Amino acid sequence: MLFTQKQVTRSKKIVILCNDQKIPITVYGGGSGTVGGVFPLNGGITIDMGKLNNIIEFDRESELISVESGLILDNLEESLNYEGYTIRHFPQSMKSASIGGLIATKSVGQFSTKYGGIEDILVGLDVLLPNGKIVKTTRVPRTSTGPDIKNIFIGSEGTFGIILTATLKVLKIPEKMIFSSYLCQDFFKGIDAIKELLQSGLKPPVIRLYNQEESELKFRKIGLNKKGSLLILCHEGLKNIVDSEIKETNKICQRHGLTYTGDKIGKMWYKHRFDTKGIMEYNQKTGGISDAIEISVNWNGIKKLYQEVIQYFKKNSIKFAAHLSHIYPTGASIYFIYYVKSDDESKAEKLFFQTWNEVLMIILKNNASISHHHGIGIVKKELLKEELGEGYDILLGIKNCLDPNKILNKGKLVD
């Protein structure tokens, strides 16, 4: 730990110097963000957290692990698996994302319906402030000693402080994991089935409902030979509980007219779930740009919002796909994936951002959130105040209090 302490001491000196001289600082974790949060827009220096990558303590009795913020999640998961444990936090970026970055962007993973987001896994952290002081939050199951200070830094995108260490919950690797899939002739019937699942108290860790466009795009090559919307489910835990949950889930799905299609597609999804080859290949084509707008909406507005966004894509002849994942008793996250193309790169970029902004306005009009877990960064910043209203001024007040010289990740989140 001596080398680590040297790194922290060096970081403190750099931060204090930059604060005194008003030199901008951008903190770099794994660089896996998709909304531009790590771009140094105002010059200055970048602090790479990569060498703060140690496991500090593993408390098996409490099932807690304390780590440095530069540790890559996949490396942590591999170390835990060797001991029979798991974080159960599987974002698309886990092979390159750092623990600090996951906290700073309020990450969520593919198994979130049962285990929650990073905010449900994080117990405490240490944060280096611009004035050189280190805030150490309490590491206990719950406290009533005022507002939870760690929540100030969850989702702060590197604008309030530099995350140094984190204490996270861990779990024993589940005894049994079972995948299943169902075909829905009507996308909205799939939504109704999912809503009943969650509101009945069942929480399969993975629930992914793909509309017909994305179902064909992703799964036709591996055996989906019928039209419709594909629902993939995963149950895991103690064997007897898993078996009971599967029986109840099947009853609900049948009641909504869904057809069971076996476990093959679910297993294939799990095996290839980190593969983004298709999107990357499209982006490498001349004039081709694709991305996902991930939003959060309550059940009472989800169908109307979905219809309005899809109608917008069709009206403008934009290729699209969509799916639900990260499900709650009160609502869900929807991914709207779209693809634009032009023979001229600049025209393609203009069309991409025009589409991006117009879809976000539809989302705001429907009382939904413009980001479920990717964060704000650069590309959603202009609409943040539109969503937060007076809450934006509260964030601005926190920024002015913790970083009055505006050195941390300048130009992001709040200015």
Image (cartoon, rainbow, N blue to C red):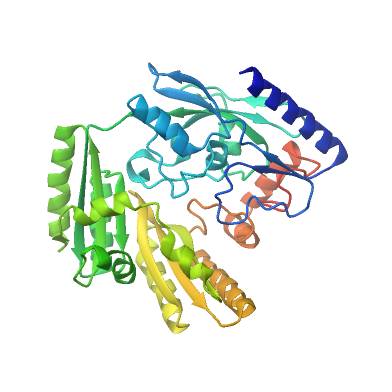
Question: As rendered, which of 200 and 207 lies closer to the eye?
Answer: 207
**Residue 240 at what x, y percent from top left?**
14, 33
Total numbered badges shown on the rendered structure: 0
| Picture quadrant of residue 195 | bottom left
Q: Is residue 379 above or below residue 307?
A: above
**Residue 29 in view:** yes
Q: Is residue 341 above or below residue 14?
A: below
Q: Vertical placement of 63 versus 316: above or below?
A: above
Q: Position of residue 333 (x, y in %)?
A: 40, 56
Q: Residue furthest right?
A: 21
* Residue 61 relative to residue 107: left or right: left
Q: Residue at x 32, y 41 (%)?
A: 114
Specify whether 361 is left or right of 120: right
Nearer to us in this view, 79 or 333: 79
Q: Position of residue 200 (x, y in %)?
A: 23, 46
Residue 196 visible to an observer of this rendering = no
Image position of 160 with respect to 288: above or below: above
> In the rendered view, does 128 fall on the left or right side of 357?
right
Image-based side of 188 in relation to 145, left or right: left
Location of the N terminus by quadrant is: top right
Which image quadrant for residue 192? Answer: bottom left
Q: Nearer the viewer, residue 13 or 253?
A: 13
**Residue 307 pos. (x, y %):** 38, 73
- Residue under the point 74% across and 27% down: 10
**At 42% from the left edge and 65% from the top edge, which residue is drawn?**
278
Please report the residue visible at 60 percent of the width from the left and 37 percent of the height from the top. Answer: 152
